[in-house]
Image (spheres, rainbow, N blue to C red):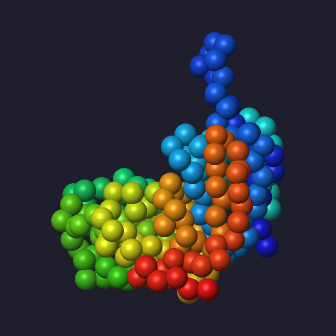
Amino acid sequence: MNVIEVEHVSKTYSDGGETTTVALRDVSFNVREGEFLAIMGPSGSGKSTLLHLLGLLDISTAGQYRFDGKNVEMYSRDEQAYIRNAKMGFVFQAFNLLPRTTVLENVKLPLAYSQVPEAKWNTMARQAVEAVGLGHREQHQTSELSGGERQRVAIARALVNNPQVIFADEPTGNLDSKSGKQVMSIIQKLNEEQGRTIVLITHETATAEHAERVIRLKDGVIERDEKVLHRLRPDDEYVK
């Protein structure tokens, strides 16, 4: 089953005058449920634009995008907001955590905008924190954590609503190599052990090769869409 279906999608921006910038041009691909897909390319290739479209943060100029079998243009703004919170999880390079708030409170935040009864928030947040190996840090403020730990908190926050898809936007971009490996290990386990659908945005080949499939963008066009034959593991070993 495909959770994401993108057909002939294009996105252009206009400055209000005669200048038009083409960010994406006739892009088509699907993401099946439980797949780990990496979308990679250099700066200006269209990665961020595509992420915004997939995450319902923007709309395409042409083409169709179906999420969970339904054309996203058929969803109202309220329905789109619900999908972003309940069916999508987001992990960003900049973490986007509240600095003077505990790990547990940060992870609970999406639940405040959900239909989950408040009585369940602590239990669900603790399960997500445990899933990223930070149970012993749940009462620490995020400002007291290392960069790698903060990104793990961001992953836990993305998990807490049990989303259909997790979008990870350059999740290792602000991390040293050791912390980056730890974060990629967690993301791989979420895919391999829990069957989570992952869409990873990156400009780094090594990071993309943790996925099982890579789409390479260049100048807003899909240059290649290929299976990763030898996936890179966090310990730098390749497996078939």
Q: Is residue 199 left or right of residue 24?
A: left
Q: Is residue 11 visible?
A: yes
Query: Percent x, y for residue 6?
Result: 76, 53
Residue situated in front as seen by the camera: 208 or 3:
208
Quadrant in the rendering for residue 25 = top right
Q: Can you name the residue that lies furthest to the left here?
A: 144
Q: Is residue 74 left or right of residue 159?
A: right
Query: Percent x, y for residue 127?
Result: 42, 82
Task: Work out whether 16 lies above or below 240.
Answer: above
Residue situated in front as seen by the camera: 91 or 211:
211
Query: Percent x, y for residue 190?
Result: 52, 79
Q: Is residue 235 left or right of residue 22?
A: left
Q: Is residue 150 visible?
A: no
Q: Give me the residue at 64% from left, 50% from top.
A: 217
Q: Is residue 46 left or right of residue 188?
A: right
Q: How many marks?
A: 0
Q: Give me the residue at 60% from left, 79% from top.
A: 230
Task: Work out whether 100 lies above or below 131.
Answer: above
Q: Give me the residue at 81% from left, 51% from top.
A: 7
Q: Give me the residue at 48% from left, 80% from top.
A: 233
Q: Quadrant of the N terminus?
A: bottom right
Query: Percent x, y for residue 165?
Result: 61, 66
